Image (spheres, rainbow, N blue to C red):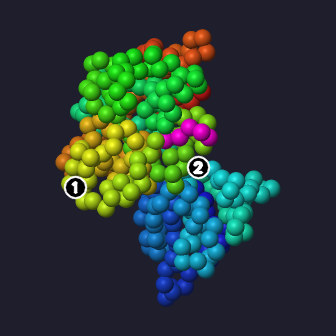
């Protein structure tokens, strides 16, 4: 989360009774947005606040714009660190200078969030995961990677162990993981590339994220078309026309949840901060199920997906158990 240094002066300035309320503009990470909404509610009597999402990269870009730019914000929410292409850290250890504008901004950590991998409850995906007890990070990498099985094998993943029931039909299906699962395509959903959540999930599951390996994103034109549909039409598109296995990205958490709940084979990731209080179900009452991560087994320098039966509480806790690299 990033706060423009000018904001600190604004917070200290006295306000005359008859003057209009000072105006603050906030934009950025969708996982930080629930926190920003609480600030907005707490400061309603003292400040007029405009709050937008857009992802961490949007927050970084807009807080670095010149103050005269109508897109400039006072607070840029981020769920990741600054990139060296955006700003440089100064000697005090907490002030950053934007490379293009020279704006100086102060970084303040306000919360720690976690990531959840989820499927629709009572779906084909849910039934499969319940049958096999959970997924390992190596299996998540097989699902979300745009690398071929041969490339993953060469990089140390035991495909025979992780995907023991593969039928070689070129479509990743839940039945590939276990014969008890339905022959339904595994369709991924997740944050777009403007999001720090996208980068963190990629680094955790794909390892050296940003290199040759990445997510197999769906066609951009198809995504624009889908985003323009109403909920019923979008559900029908996902259930009848969706391209199997490609990742459907969005910066809008509500859209991701809607798409995931329309897809019996869908599997998505996102920040846990925005879940709860009814946001993990749709208007039909459909709910999500958070996937249990299991500990993989290391043998002879390779990643095997045999189960030891030890559940791992979350992605961050599982970092040390990731044998996908």
The location of residue 56, given as percent across then percent down, is: 54, 56
Q: Residue at x 41, y 43 (%)?
A: 247
Q: Nearer the viewer, residue 159 or 189?
A: 159
The CA span between labels 2 and 1 is: 34 Å
- Residue sitting at the far bottom: 18
> The C terminus is located in which quarter?
top right
Label 1: element kind = helix
Q: Which mark is residue 80?
A: 2
* Residue 107 shows in the view: yes
- Residue sitting at the far top: 300
- Residue sitting at the far front: 169
Q: Which residues are magenta?
A: 211-215
Magenta stretch, overall SS: loop
* Residue 8 shows in the view: no
Task: Tell me if 83 is positioned left or right of 277 in this view.
Answer: right
Q: Nearer the viewer, residue 296 or 4?
A: 296
Q: Residue at x 47, y 60 (%)?
A: 54
The residue at which mark 1 appears reads as 233
Label 2: element kind = loop
187 over 58 or under it: above or below = above
Q: Nearer the viewer, residue 130 or 51?
A: 130
Closer to the eye: label 2 or 1: 1
Q: Quadrant of residue 161?
A: top left
Q: Residue at x 58, y 49 (%)?
A: 80
The location of residue 221, given as percent across then percent down, is: 39, 57
> The N terminus is located in which quarter?
bottom right
């Amino acid at each position: 989360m990033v706060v423009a240094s000018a904001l600190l002066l604004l917070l200290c300035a006295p306000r005359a009774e008859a003057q209009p309320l000072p105006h603050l503009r906030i934009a950025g990470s969708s996982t930080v947005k629930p926190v920003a909404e609480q600030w907005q509610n707490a400061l309603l009597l003292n400040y007029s606040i405009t709050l937008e999402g857009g992802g961490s990269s949007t927050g970084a870009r807009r807080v670095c714009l010149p103050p005269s730019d109508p897109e400039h914000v006072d607070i840029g929410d981020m769920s990741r660190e600054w990139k060296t292409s955006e700003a440089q850290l100064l000697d005090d250890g907490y002030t950053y200078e934007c490379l293009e504008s020279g704006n100086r901004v102060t970084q303040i950590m306000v919360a720690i969030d976690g990531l959840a991998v989820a499927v629709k409850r009572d779906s084909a995906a849910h039934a499969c995961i319940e049958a096999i007890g959970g997924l390992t990070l190596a299996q998540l990498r097989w699902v979300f990677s745009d690398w071929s099985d041969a490339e993953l094998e060469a990089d140390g993943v035991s495909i025979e162990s992780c995907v023991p029931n593969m039928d070689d039909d070129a479509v990743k299906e839940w039945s590939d993981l276990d014969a008890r699962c339905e022959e339904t395509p595994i369709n991924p959903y997740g944050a777009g590339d403007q999001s720090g959540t996208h980068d963190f999930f990629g680094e955790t599951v794909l390892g050296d994220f940003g290199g040759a390996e990445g997510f197999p994103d769906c066609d951009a034109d198809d995504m624009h078309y889908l985003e323009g549909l109403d909920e019923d039409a979008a559900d029908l598109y996902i259930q009848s026309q969706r391209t199997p296995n490609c990742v459907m990205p969005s910066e809008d958490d509500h859209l991701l949840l809607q798409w995931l709940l329309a897809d019996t084979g869908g599997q998505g990731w996102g920040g846990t901060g925005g879940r709860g209080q009814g946001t993990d179900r749709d208007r039909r009452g459909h709910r999500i199920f958070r996937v249990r991560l299991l500990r993989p087994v290391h043998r002879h320098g390779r990643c095997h997906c045999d189960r030891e039966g030890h559940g791992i509480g979350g992605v961050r806790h599982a970092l040390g158990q990731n044998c996908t690299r």
